Amino acid sequence: MAKLVINGPTKLSGEISVCGSKNAALKIIPASILSKETITINNLPDIEDISRSLELIEYLGAKVSRSGSVCKINTENITKVDIPPNIANKIRASIMFVGPLLARFGEVYFPHPGGCVIGAGIRPIDFFIEGFAKMGTVTEIKDGMYRLTAKKLSGCEYFFAKPSVTGTESLMMTATLSFGITTLKNCAMEPEIKALAEYLVQQGAKIEGAGTPTICIRGVDTIHADNFDIIPDRIETGTFAIMAAATKSQLIIKKCIPEHIESLLSIFQRIGIDFDQGSDFIKIKPTKKFLPYNIMTHEYPGFPTDLQSPFTVLMTQAEGTSLIHETIYDRRLLFTDMLTQMGADITMCDPHRVVVYGPTKLYGRKLTSPDLRAGIAMIIAALVAKGETEIDNIYQIDRGYESIDKRLSLCGAKVRRTKD
């Protein structure tokens, strides 16, 4: 099994470019099923989750050709409507194929989606099942498999009990080819949702309100396919910004959209981390001392749960005490035990809250990445820590960060990929 070996402490320098959004890419691939024409996806990140998603759509019968960051998908000859467990167990985003398959074929079979430890079998899909039922689907569960069928999908009104990014995107895609008008309320407002809706509208869909709490979709018979340019990954942008701040480095983050991480940058201003920004770059400047800050994760435009783990590492270097409150996912704070092994002073109040006391010196240790975001947090901690750190189970990191070892090496990090 591959692992990363990192020697610290290290100061980063130079420039690093942000790749295409993982979360946007994982939605446009299944969205291609809505049209029988060929879609060209640009700025596609080369990460494990994308490879698994392309593997799944090829299994269904689509033709896929990929060259670097450009991928063409034609779904005209899709014949299968089942999502195999061996792929679904590896990727949470397999659930995003359900709606488009249901919209186009009126039938789909799938297991509960997997992914990392915080997603495997414990993140519910109630919003999907309830929403599809409102549109006229019948759900059967047998031997751990869901079977959804619909003679005719019809428009409906659905209120999300809690904003859900994947739920919003899934029902929005499904409603695109449904009969009548669908109104979705209390929707998630992430930039990836707006980007997906804008593409679908350009191809003939009738969608209004994407990026707001209420989305209205008037169903159409068919839509076309064309070019989709994936927006920069806002989580990667924020991760690199935190990494530079934690290592007290000067780093220019290129090909990003700073306004997508406004919640983080506003905190930087409050705690004294110096930076400049333009329309497509952020320059983090070395800051010797910065203040602590209490965060509570929240749906966009609040502080993203996917940046909570890196931010927790940052607070181990702050001048004081911080409260980290994770409101989105259970178990996401369990990784802090590894930070304490490295020397961090952290008290777990309950599964959703920890108190971080800083600044503390961190020391290299042998660690195992439990999930995608905790894995990148371990890399940040290793760059801060004195000595050598080994991180196992880096498949989880590769799921969301393209060639992270090579890209960080170009910025001065002492990191190498090895195998046991």
Image: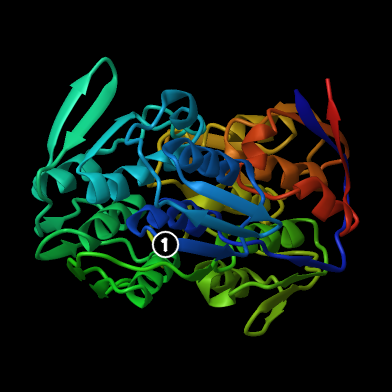
The residue sitting at the bottom extreme is 278
Instruction: Using a 10 Å C-alpha cutoff, classify the residue at mark 1 as few (fewer than 14 neighbours), some (14 to 19) or many (20 or more).
Output: some
Report the residue at 10% width, 44% height from top. Answer: 151
Q: Residue at x 66, y 40 (%)?
A: 397
**33 left or right of 42?**
left
Q: Name the one closer to the observer, 381 or 398.
A: 398
x and y, in percent, of residue 390 in the image? 81, 30
Q: In the rendered view, would you say 328 is above or below 25?
A: above
- The residue that mark 1 highlights is 37
Q: Which is more toward the observer, 358 or 80?
A: 80
- The scheme the figure's colours follow is rainbow
Where is the C terminus found, in terms of image quarters?
top right
Residue 297 in view of the camera: no
Relative to 119, is 124 on the left or the right?
Answer: left
Q: Quadrant location of residue 43?
A: bottom right
Residue at point 66%, 84% (across, down): 278
Instruction: Check the image and report above or below for 32 versus 63.
Output: below
